[in-house]
Amino acid sequence: MTNNDNAPFSFRLIATDGMARRGEIRTPHGTVRTPAFMPVGTQATVKAMYPDQVRELGSDVVLGNTYHLMLRPTAERVARLGGLHKFMNWPHTILTDSGGFQVMSLAQLRKLSEKGVTFQSHVDGQKIEMTPERSIEIQQLLGSDIQMQLDECIALPAPREEAERAMRLSLRWAERSRVQFEAMGGPGRGQALYGIVQGGTDPELRLESAGMLSQMPFEGYSVGGLAVGEPQEVMLKTLEITTPAMPADKPRYLMGVGTPEDILESVARGIDQFDCVLPTRAGRHGLAYTRYGKVNLKNARHADDPRPLDETSPCEASNRYSRAYLHHLVKAGEGLAAMLLTWNNLAYYQQLMQGIRDAIEAQTFEEFRARTRADWAKGDIPPFASR
């Protein structure tokens, strides 16, 4: 799709198979095929990868982080330099999160109020205020295609009273975020703002949050506050309750998730978009994802193994380099280890997403799901037996 800075944001549902959905999101910077995995480019870079590599692997969209970019190099500087797309040489769709999660997890001496959050920067100790309005202002300066409301994300498990307080505050912040987004002309530029469903793991709170947000004119809706300490089965049960209450004609985004299994199971429960640092972070720490599960290249059993990670993969990082060589790079602390393993991991994630999309269109998602889980259950290929 040719980039068009005036193209409206839209979502088209192409096929369904059970609760699984195949669709397309159109933004001024291209078409996003859903279900989509969005590599995380926290500080305007997907770590250890060139932008062209990320695109060639099948990524239609990457994620940038409002909190980190507001601190360094600052959103105002990015705007002066032509916006985030130009700054990071990514002419395709960009989603920015609101910065709320990082304020809660990284900032020092934070103080929460109805107005917003005042915190001390983890970079230089500067005192900063983040409000729903300021979060939208930063995202507008960055020029992202899909933007997120400011919300409060709490760790789980949490008392119901705490989950309810944070959920209601997030709803009020959602209204203020929307007002600011419209005042700054986001809809006229084809940009989108997503509301975020909160409520911990309490079914009533999740349904109330989804219902209230559905009455607000957001272009998409997210499920936040999961994968923050609760067991996977609790997360999936919460999704089973929540996604049917979200608008069916808008994209559904599960924030910060996750493992390949999390993604496969969440697609089965109606989710369209995902992001997670896992494939890139794992790659920097010697862990590879393959169609037969995880491979820890730190393990000594790979030291004499001449086989690649996956000879059937079209990714060169997966099929051209021996496990012995990758093990050596990891043990030696070489930067190439992070580059090759991140390349492999993102390739696998995008292959998984393409397989999911094809299966939904072919009405064979359950077969694909069962076959994929069976492959994972087999575990990695047997250790190489040297002669």
Image: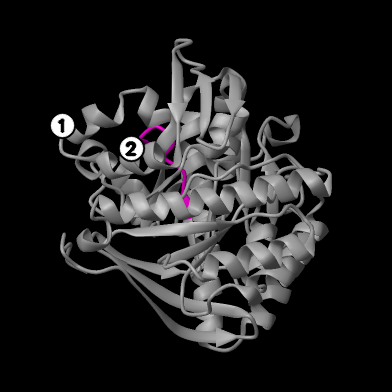
* Magenta range: 38-48
From this view, report whether residue 136 is shown above or below residue 354.
above
Quadrant of the image containing the N terminus: bottom left
Which mark, by number, is residue 80? 1
Residue 231 versus residue 218: which sits nearer the camera?
Answer: 218
* Apparent side of residue 363 relative to residue 6 in the rendered image (left or right): right
Count of numbered labels shown in the rendering: 2
- In three-dimensional space, the C-alpha distance between marks 2 and 1, rounded to whole angstroms, equals 13 Å
Residue 311 visible in the picture: yes
* Apparent side of residue 274 relative to residue 130 in the rendered image (left or right): right
Residue 318 drawn at (x, y percent):
51, 49
Q: Residue at x 52, y 24 (%)?
A: 118
From this view, report whether residue 15 is shown above or below residue 281.
below
Q: Residue at x 23, y 32 (%)?
A: 78
* Apparent side of residue 361 relative to residue 71 in the rendered image (left or right): right
Quadrant of the image containing the C terminus: top right
By secondary structure, the bulk of the magenta-drawn segment is best described as: loop
Residue 139 drawn at (x, y percent):
33, 43
Residue 262 versus residue 134: which sits nearer the camera?
Answer: 134
Tell me which corner region of the image, top left, top right, bottom left or bottom right, holds residue 301: top right
